Structure formats: structure tokens, C-alpha cells
Image (spheres, grey):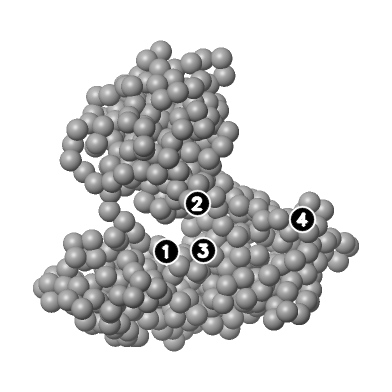
Amino acid sequence: MKYQVIIIGGGPAGYTAAEAAGKAGMSVLLIEKRSVGGVCLNEGCIPTKTLLYSAKLLDNAKGASKYAITAGDVSFDLPKIIARKNKVVRKLVLGIKAKLSASQVSMVDGTATIVDKNHVQVGEDIYEGEKLIICTGSETFVPTITGLDQVDYWTHRNALDAKELPASLTIVGGGVIGMEFASFFNSLGVKVTVIEMMDEVLSGMDKELSGHLRHEYAKRGIQFLLQTRVVALSQDSDGICVTYEQDEEKATIVSEKLLLSVGRKAVMHGFGLENLGLQLTQRGNVVVNEHMETSLSGVYACGDITGFSLLAHTAVREAEVAVNHLLGKPDTMSYRAIPGVVYTNPEFAGVGQTEESLLAKGITYCAETIPMAYSGRFVAENEGVNGYCKLLLDEDKRIIGAHVLGNPASEIITLAGIAIEMMMTAAEFKKIVIPHPTVGEIFREAL
């Protein structure tokens, strides 16, 4: 069987590329070994946000009296929360399958093995394609820790399907995944401890605002152990014992459950990538040009395998660029304004440069930081709570970075992202009329 395009991986990059190429009239084969939607839809972005929304509603109900609302006794049903999460995932997976079918995309379930740039094998069948797009995604990184093989630990996948709440939970890793699960379980009353090797949680996000978010959750009872390294694990009738090293001294903490969330790594093995002889970066990711084409003509790579950004929305845009290029449409990939969001409560979002990245590059900048209380809408909807908005400007007063701590940061960060991508100056951005009252007005106030 011969196709114009063969795509390996049905995550955000893969299904976006397949739909776009199919809509353009190309014959497309999409190969996925698990479930269409990839990690993002099945065990990442969507299920975690579904759980976190339930937790946010619980938080709001408990705090209803601040808004003169009497909610009475508030409780939750964890199995039903998990069941709703599964229902949401199933609905969205079916929706993606329907869109792929409508775009005349052929789909094969199974593990792909690349024979060469024009041939891919699945089981006993070999498929021929003119172009190849590799979208294999990423997987959980499990660190080497003494005693790990003797401990019944969770990864994010296990945590998503927890039917019973542990009394206590230790989370190794204070990145986005770790902080979101810390937020969820803290809202549900679990005693949570977060262990992080760096001197602040959420490495890569704005450090000052990350600190504010950590302080907020510390007030809610989460214990944070920063600049701390886990050196050994063991398990007994009391729970899981985590031995850690901090300031050259060792100590232990015991909890009922342990969640490992120290990051993800691109899937680079198990599908014959070595048969292509592609150029790789020093970190082992696939090298691509501005059109997402690899060092081998006609072979493209999108999503986590490129190593630029392990984020679904980045993968989607990369896939669009790749398909446009093979269709002969002018398009290039830009990483100037890739938003990052932490769906805690409050939310935390950033786009563009951080102060830390600018200092590392030696770029001169100025920072404008104001409390979120400068937004009337924010004050109306966040009784007794504050947050911060920070804008970073270069010497020409162009907006090059934006960071927001406070709800709904995930929704308003796009405003700043557009300004950064379009390389707008502060004066140009202030000409845009933003509806009042909205929280997005905070960017105008910051300027």
C-alpha cells in the first residue's frame, strides 16, 4: 500500500498533521501504537485539567462564604471524579477519530518500525510513503534511585486513576506535573510534600512568581524541600521511606504514596529511527530546520522528538508548518512566543523570555510588575487573593516576556503572546482596545 504521507504517532503533532494533509487531498496513513490523542489527551493535559477543575470547584465551594454564599457541608466523590475524567477523555478521543475519518485519513493500530525513508513496517505489513513525519512524543523519565525497584511508586499515569486517597503523598519533582498534582491532592485534603533538586519550583518559569506560588501553597499546608536530592527509597508497613540529602545532611520522610514526576524524555528508540541516520543534537534530539524537515529530505519531525518544547500546542504548530512545507505553502516555525501554563489554583502562565533567560544571555531589559489588584474584574472575582503581572521590555520598549500569577492566567496569556510574536512595542500594544472589565486589562495597566 502506498501513501503520499506516513505519520508515526497519533498525539497532537501526529493527528494535526494527518488532518491537515488529509484535508488538502493527500493520501495519509497515521500509525499509533496506543490511543489516538497521545499522552496529552489520554494521560496528560486533558485528564489532569479535568481533575484540577473538580479540585478548583471544591476550593471555590469551601471559600463561598467570602462571596456571601452559604454552601453548607461540601464533600467530594473521588471515584466519580475519576469516572468523569475518563468520560471526558473518551469523548475527545472519539472527536479526533471522527475528524481524521472525515479527512480521509487511514489509521493503523500497532508499533511502527522504520525500514527506510519510504517504507514503514507494522507487524507483517509494509507501507510505502512519499513523505514521512515522525511524531513519537515523549515518555516519563524515571531516575535511577537506590531501592526504586523495591518500592510501589506512582507515575502521573497511576495518580490519574487513583480510586482512593492516600493520607500522605511525597512528590519527587517540583515541575509542572509535580505542582499540578500537589495542587490537586492538597485540595482533596492529602498531606503533600514536594522534593525539588533546584532552588525553586517550576524551573524555566519566572523565578520570582514561582516563589510566590510556592509560598501560597506552603500556607495551604504543602511542605517544600528545595535543593534536595533523593538518595534512597524503601518500603515497609508504615509506608514509603524517602531518604534525601539537603545541605550535605541526610534525613528521611515517610508517606503512604510516592509520586515520581522529574520530567519527560523524547521517545527516540523502538521504531527504527536509527535506520534513517538523521542528524541529532548534542542532547540526542532530532535536528530540524525552520520547516520541521530533518537532515534527510522528505522526512519531518514534530513535537517532543525535536526537544524544543515538550508542549502539545508547540507540537500542533510544528505539525502545521511541516504539512504546509510539503504542500509547497510558505511557512516557518517560530519559538518566540510559546506559552507555558501551570494549572494550579491560582494559575500561573508565562510566554517569551524570563528575567533569568535574559540575564543568562546578557540582554538589557526592564521589568514592569504590578499586583493583579490593578484589574477591577480580578478584584471582583478573587476576594482576599492577589497575584502579579510582570512584563519584560527590551531597549526598544518591545514586549519580549510576560508572566502572570492569578486566575485566569491561562486564558489571558495569549494576549501577551500575540504582542511578543508580532514584536509589538508597549506603545503599539496600548492602542489595542481590551474590553472592560476583564482581567486581560492587566497588561495595559502594567504598561
Q: Amino acid at mark 1?
A: Val
Looking at the image, is mark 3 or mark 2 earlier in the sequence? 3
Q: Is residue 361 left or right of residue 135?
A: left
Looking at the image, is mark 3 or mark 4 earlier in the sequence? 4
Measured from the top left, where is residue 197 in percent x and y? 62, 70
Residue that carries the numbered disc 1 in the rendered image = 341
Contact, CB < 8 Å: mark 1 with mark 2? no
Disc 1 from disc 4: Cα separation: 30 Å
Residue 148 tag number:
4
Vertical order, 385 against 265 (above or below): below
Q: Amino acid at mark 4?
A: Leu
Q: Amino acid at mark 3?
A: Val
Residue that carries the numbered disc 2 in the rendered image = 283
Vertical order, 193 against 19 (above or below): below
Q: Is residue 59 left or right of residue 29?
A: right
Say whether residue 79 is visible: no
Looking at the image, is mark 1 or mark 2 earlier in the sequence? 2
Q: For mark 4, give the secondary structure.
A: helix
Q: Is residue 276 left or right of residue 242?
A: left
Looking at the image, is mark 4 or mark 2 earlier in the sequence? 4
The residue sitting at 80% across, 66% down in the picture is 241
Residue that carries the numbered disc 3 in the rendered image = 176
Q: For mark 2, give the secondary structure.
A: loop
Quarter of the rendering containing residue 278: top left
Q: For mark 1, give the secondary structure.
A: strand
Quarter of the rendering containing residue 240: bottom right
In front: mark 3 or mark 2?
2
Q: For mark 3, give the secondary structure.
A: helix
The residue sitting at 25% across, 77% down in the picture is 393
- Mark 1 surroundings: few (<14), some (14-19) or many (≥20) residues within 10 A: many
Q: Amino acid at mark 2?
A: Arg
